[in-house]
Image (tube, rainbow, N blue to C red):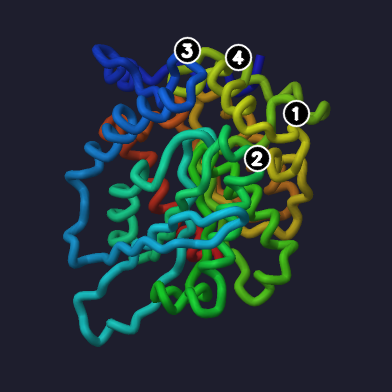
Amino acid sequence: MSQHTHLSTPDPELITALKGTEGSSQGDSETDDIVLLREAADKGFIAMVMEHNRPNLPPVMKYKLEDHKVPVAGGEITVRALIPVSENETESSRVFPLLFWIHGGGWMLGNLDLDDFYLRNVCVDLQIVIINVDYRLSPENPFPTGLNDCYAALKWVGAASNPSLFNVSLDEGFIIAGQSAGANGAAAISHRVIKDPFFDNKPVTGQLLQIPMVCHPDAYPEMYKSELLSVEQIRDAPFLSRVQLDRIMKYLQAPPSDPDMSPLLSAHEGLPPMYAQVCGWDPLRDEGLLYERVLREAGVITKLDIYPGVFHGFHLAFPKIEAGIRFDRDFRNGIRWLLREH
């Protein structure tokens, strides 16, 4: 039994919120048809998330929204820039820190809309430029296409001419962030950038990992297997079950031990400070907790928040329960912490 098993006892308020609903799945039906899965996610879950966040949209004069095409291997992708707008003309030349965001969805679902309304609020509230990446999805684009798309977009943003395009100063802060599969990508990219001379003069200053997957279940290191039990002990959790996780891996076609798939297997010295949010009723729980500890033991500055009794992605479906309010508050404070730490 995992030493963290107590964290999976369901939150009573979440259980109450679940009653009378069909859950908060993102394509958890038994079908393997990716077209049907995406249609269900787009019309159901993503539409619901957008409606949850619509009342909190900031006034349109408070920010700019710009979509840009970015060349990638074999095509192009879209990135969405959210840029704060100052009401004070004397601050019109003000520059902002940058948060580079990778959405979740198991590398097979999701799009710019999933987090768009929420990120607009964060952009204005924290006065930070946010770049949201619409990477290509599996199974049509197997590993490492989506990750490479995100990396190409990051380098495009970091290129000499582009920070000024977005009123960004990377000296103010340069954070790579993501949720679920996006956190998997953010963790992998955080390892890539410290080895890439391109970033020598523009180092990433922080990484933010929400409910991360950091190791393929088939590549759990022997030395940690006794600690990585939640993937089986919570295999039937809402929203992300072991069946869904296996489907994600089948579509992604990633070699389990590839460090880009399983950043837990990399060397961690020299990584930027890391903030993580981990849910207790989540098959990925033990990975997130272990990853924070391993990074900390490698000398990385870390900060961790844990949410007992709530499942993977609960905050998207139920943002108004107490745990959801805390998750949002901690996310914003986590960004502030990373900006201070750099």
Which quarter of the figure has residue 85?
Answer: bottom left
Q: Which residue is mark 2?
A: 143
- 234 up-or-down from 197: above or below: above
Counting residues from the start of the chain, the first of labels 4 and 3 encountered is 3
- 24 up-or-down from 118: above or below: above
Disc 2/disc 1 C-alpha distance (Å) = 19 Å
Inspect the image, locate mark 2, and give the three-letter code of the amino acid beneath it: Phe
Of 172 and 181, the residue lying toward us: 181
Counting residues from the start of the chain, the first of labels 1 and 3 encountered is 3
Q: Position of residue 44 (x, y in %)?
A: 30, 27
Q: Is residue 261 visible?
A: yes
Q: Which mark is residue 233?
A: 4
Disc 4/disc 3 C-alpha distance (Å) = 21 Å
Of 135 and 268, the residue lying toward us: 135
Inspect the image, locate mark 4, and give the three-letter code of the amino acid beneath it: Gln
In what element is the residue under mark 2? loop
> Which residue is the extreme one toward the bottom?
90
Q: Which residue is mark 1?
A: 220
Left or right: 310 in relation to 159: left
Q: Position of residue 22 (x, y in %)?
A: 31, 15
Inspect the image, locate mark 3, and give the three-letter code of the amino acid beneath it: Glu
Q: Residue at x 27, y 13 (%)?
A: 19
Counting residues from the start of the chain, the first of labels 2 and 1 encountered is 2
Check disc 1: other Cα within 10 Å, few if <14, some if 14-19, many if 20+: many
Q: Which residue is mark 3?
A: 30
